[in-house]
Amino acid sequence: MARGSKSKYSSKQKRKAEHIEEGYKKRGTTGKEAERRAWATVNKESGGGKKSGSGRGKKESKASSRKGGRKGGRRGRECFLARERVSIAVLGRSLAQRI
């Protein structure tokens, strides 16, 4: 198997890498760099190439996906306003309980 070959990856991992790559391209990353980052993310989450079969391997980590969702979710002022509303609501509740 040549270095960089994707033959040992499951179809689910290949689909996942393709989806992640599209996201990076959408954010302005070059094609080659987007592909590299996508496969690095898949490797980090699932621990490299997988073979199909029941009871093989370890549970997948979703840390990268959660981080990406937080970074790419709400943007700019919209995110700031949402955070402000929450903090004001929490602050108001705590003051009401103290009085």
Image (cartoon, rainbow, N blue to C red):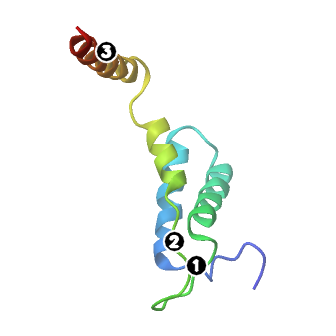
Answer left or right for 37 relative to 23: right
Residue to which mark 2 is pinned: 13
**Badge 3: few (under 14), some or many (20 or more) residues near its Cα, within 10 Å?**
few
Q: Quadrant of the C terminus?
A: top left
Residue to which mark 3 is pinned: 91
Task: Find the distance from the CA under tag 1 to the CA under tag 3.
Answer: 49 Å
**Badge 1: few (under 14), some or many (20 or more) residues near its Cα, within 10 Å?**
some
Q: Residue at x 27, y 11 (%)?
A: 95
Q: Nearer the viewer, residue 73 or 89?
A: 89
Residue 42, how many percent across, how many down?
A: 58, 64
**Image height of 10 relative to 65, above or below:** below
Task: Tell me the tag on residue 66.
Answer: none
Task: Find the distance from the CA under tag 1 to the CA under tag 2.
Answer: 6 Å
Secondary structure of the residue carrying tag 1 is loop
Q: Nearer the viewer, residue 83 or 97?
A: 97
Amino acid type, label 3? Leu
Q: Residue at x 29, y 20 (%)?
A: 90
Q: Nearer the viewer, residue 61 or 78?
A: 61
Amino acid type, label 1? Tyr
Secondary structure of the residue carrying tag 3 is helix
**Badge 2: few (under 14), some or many (20 or more) residues near its Cα, within 10 Å?**
many
Residue to which mark 1 is pinned: 9
Amino acid type, label 2? Gln
Residue contact between numbered discs 1 and 2, judged by CB atoms under 8 Å: yes
Nearer mark to the viewer, of 1 and 3: 3
Q: Residue at x 23, y 18 (%)?
A: 93
Residue contact between numbered discs 1 and 3, judged by CB atoms under 8 Å: no
Q: Quadrant of residue 45?
A: bottom right
Nearer mark to the viewer, of 3 and 2: 3
Answer left or right for 19 relative to 39: left
